Image: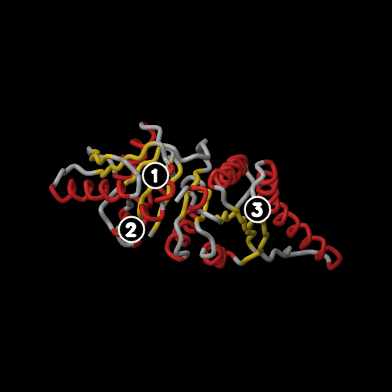
Amino acid sequence: MPIRDAFKDVFLPLVGEPTAPALAAIETCVAAAADLGAKITALAVEEDISVRPKVALWPDLETAAETEAVRSVTDSQGLLNAFKNAASRLNVRADGRLHRLAAHLIAPSLAEHARFSDLTLAPVKPHDSRSEHIIETLLFESGRPLLLCPEATELRPKFENVMIAWDHSARAARAVGDALPILQGATSVRVITVTDEKTDAIMQSGADLVDHLREHGVFTAFETVKIDGSSIGKVIGSWAQAHAIDAIVMGGYHHSRLNEVVWGGVTKTVIGEPPCWVMMSH
């Protein structure tokens, strides 16, 4: 299936302040939707905070509340305006909405909206706890693949050089299946496993994936990359940057979420600061 026929509609959650990196990420995500030939729906969310001055004369109460409301609306509206302007310039079919939600409802509400799209494009603020929480919720509760877009990195809105981070797990297999249209449309696909041990099982698993992809018109090769005292997540990022990779395909949370939080992990490292586009499934 051609890539432009595979993803009919994509979802773009917009949370936070309209900073320069956030606006650049919105532009990139809209351009990626254009390259995919998909309709893009954005949901800008502002946190519902009730603020009242501790001491104020009664005529000033309404004014104080309105001032706070205008400030909040303006921040979220700035994200939505940037989205609409980018969609108009790039001639992309688009729909944009603005919702106000309590803080604890933002992540689950975004995951619920994501269920009705083929793919979620998720802007990622580097090492930001709220951004990580939203991505984790989308990963576990939407049932759809995510395409992470790092705000701090300049990206091409194309997926020509793609890398599969293969750890032989069911989650990685799910990610490969979800990313198949992107893999079929890529110019180059590389399959790597980060390990210090080239066991027969590891080599056979990589070879089996190469054979499977060949049946879908994706011609690639498998190789292992040594950890050499680093972390798997950092090795994946360094390898991607060294080989000019546009997008990484990987499964999310191979270990339990608790282990990832306590010990760190591949998913946590990549979500904290994606080195490029990262397509992730669970």
Q: Residue at x 72, y 56 (%)?
A: 73
Instruction: Assign the C terminus to one quadrant of the image.
Output: bottom left
Would residue 214 appear left or right of 249 to someone viewing this image? left
Q: Is 228 drawn above or below residue 110 in the view shown?
A: above
Q: Residue type at mark 1?
A: Ile
Measured Cα–Cα span from mark 2 to mark 1: 14 Å
Residue at (53% x, 43% y) in the render: 151
Residue 201 lies, with reference to residue 189, above or below; the image says below
Nearer to the camera, 50 or 209: 209
Give me the C-alpha separation between circle 1 and circle 3.
26 Å
Where's residue 226, x and y in %?
22, 38
Q: Quadrant of residue 195?
A: top left
Q: CB under 8 Å between callouts 1 and 3?
A: no
Between 182 and 267, the one nearer to me in the picture: 182
Along the polypeptide, which appears first: circle 1 or circle 3? 3
> Which residue position holds label 1?
248
Do callouts 3 and 2 mark residues in contact (Cβ within 8 Å)? Answer: no
> For the residue labelled by badge 1, is the local secondary structure a helix, a strand or a loop?
strand
Query: Which residue matches tag 3?
Result: 94
Per the image, label 3 sits on a secondary structure element best described as strand
Label located before the other in sequence (2 or 1): 2
Residue bearing mark 2? 171
| Residue 280 or residue 36, whichever sits in front | 36
Q: Are marks 2 and 1 in contact (CB under 8 Å)?
A: no
- As drawn, the label of residue 226 is none
Q: As rendered, which of 85 and 18 lies closer to the eye?
A: 85
Horizontal side of 220 relative to 39 (left or right) equals left
Residue at 53% x, 47% y is 36
